[in-house]
Amino acid sequence: MMADKRKAVLYPNRENDIDFKMSKFVGEIFVKNGWEISQHVYPGYPDLSGVEMIITFGGDGTILHAARAAADVDVPILGINMGGKGFIAELEVSDIELAETAALGDYKLETRMMIDIEIMRGGKVICNDFALNDIVIKGDNKVIEMTVFGDDEMITSFSGDGTIIATPTGSTAYSMSAGGPIVEPTAKNIIITPICAHVLEAKSFVLVATRIVTVDIDHKKGISAYVSIDGGTHINIQNGDLIKVSKSEKSTSLVRLSDRSFYHKISSKLISRFNMRGTQ
């Protein structure tokens, strides 16, 4: 009796994978090595029942979207970067031949922590969600006032454009652009980074993952604000709303094939490009 074939889902972003050329190429590699392949085009959520791997073709945003479906069923993600910097993705188009290594089952898994968010209004929960990269609290082109607590003890209070609560994976995204620290992505931390704070002493904080972070919003009547979850879901918030963020029981598993370290990625995607521009 033949064993069931291993199953993988191809998850291309049509804006990056034009005519699905790359996903077709990788799909053929997996089929040749005995896998059963299906395809689901971003941004819809694929059915991952019985699936052993989801393979994304796009930027990190495509991976973040896939992670929302994969986290619930613990399916690992192989990211193929066809977008921008691609910090989360494992492969570039230039080393796509390593996809066969994955098809042969010769890969490692890397676990990334996620964070949960709960928004309360008038004592009632109006939102429960989770993120791999970050939770962004921001005023809609206006300054808002925020007080940030860790385990009910005040960490910082400031007025500004907003604040970012990030995972180590998200430390190289919006948080870094706003002046936050770069943290090894496999670490277990919660990072708080103010956005354009109107006080000189406002700094980023790196907390242990067991802290429960609460943000108390105080913005003037008529000024709108919102919460963005992994750059996707937007939730309007009101004066007096409480945003609670904590380490999630969910996690994201990423397929690792190469020996390139996180520091190599930082050097090649940030430092080297900056130096090259500076010498032109």
Image (cartoon, rainbow, N blue to C red):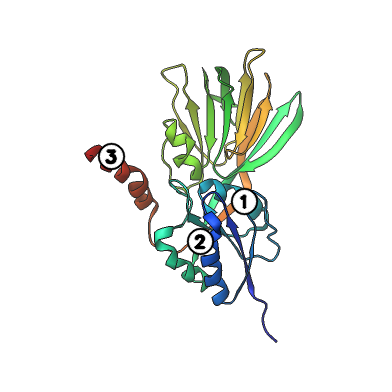
Query: What is the crowding at mark 2: few (fewer than 14 residues within 10 Å), some, or many (at least 20)?
Result: some
Residue 273 located left or right of residue 217:
left
| Between 247 and 3, the one nearer to me in the picture | 3
Q: Name the quadrant of the N terminus.
A: bottom right
- Where 194 sits versus 12, above or below? above
Q: Name the quadrant of the C terminus.
A: top left
Q: Secondary structure at mark 2?
A: helix
> Earlier along the polypeptide chain: callout 3 or callout 2?
2
> Earlier along the polypeptide chain: callout 3 or callout 1?
1
The kind of residue tagged 2 is Met
The kind of residue tagged 3 is Arg
Q: Which residue is label 3 attached to?
A: 277
Residue 183 located left or right of residue 17:
left
Query: What is the crowding at mark 3: few (fewer than 14 residues within 10 Å), some, or many (at least 20)?
Result: few
CA gap, disc 3 and disc 2: 29 Å
Q: Which residue is label 1 attached to?
A: 42
Q: Secondary structure at mark 3?
A: helix
